[in-house]
Image: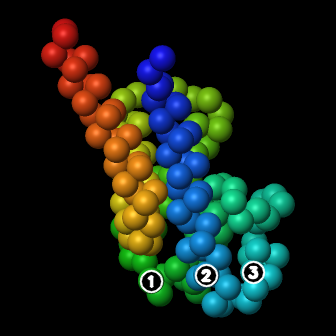
Amino acid sequence: MADTNNDRVGKTLALLAQGLASFVDRECGLIYGLDWENAVPTNGPPSKTDIQFLLHTMTSTWPEVFERTLGRMERNYVSELIDARNRWAHQEPFSSDDAYRALDSAERLLQAISAGEQAADVGRMKHDLQRRRYTEEARR
C-alpha cells in the first residue's frame, strides 16, 4: 500500500527529530551547559528526541542560541515545521502540495544543519511524492 501524505509527513518529522537532536543538543549545550533541556522554556516534559520539544526549543531560544549559526530562512522553516507537526499530530489531512512543502522545508533545514543523511532520505521521499503527483496527473 502506498504511503499517504500524512504518512510521509510523519516519517519526515521522525527523520527531522533524528537530524535535529544532536544539533540542538550541541548548540544549547554551548549556551546552557550539559543540563540544557531543564534550562529552556517548555510546554511539557523535556525530551531530546521529541520533535515538538526540539522545534519549540529552537524558537524559544533563537536569539541567544540559534541566531549565531542559522538565518531568517531557517527560522521560517522551523515555524512552518511546527505548524506541519501540529497538523500531523491532530490528524489533519495534507494535500500533496502541503505535504511537499513540509518535506521541502524539512529537507532544507536538515541541509542547513549538515544532517546530510536525513536530508537525503527526506529528499527521496519528496522526489517520490512529486513523481506520484505527475503520474496521477498524466492518468487524468
Q: Position of residue 86 (x, y in %)?
A: 61, 43
> Mark 2 = which residue?
26
Give the label on residue 69, or none.
1
Label 3 sits on what residue type?
A: Trp
Taking 87 as reference, is 4 above or below it? above
Label 2 sits on what residue type?
A: Arg
Camera-nearest label, 2 or 3 = 2
Q: Residues within 10 Å of mark 3 (few under 14, many from 20)?
A: some
Q: CA distance from mark 2 to mark 3?
A: 10 Å
| Residue at disc 2, secondary structure | helix
The residue sitting at 44% across, 83% down in the picture is 69
Residue at the left extreme of this rendering: 138
On the question of residue 83 being in view, the answer is: no
Q: On the rendered structure, is 88 left or right of 38?
A: left
Q: Earlier in the sequence, mark 1 or mark 2?
A: 2
Taking 8 as reference, is 59 above or below it? below
Q: On the rendered structure, is 39 left or right of 135?
A: right
> Mark 3 = which residue?
36
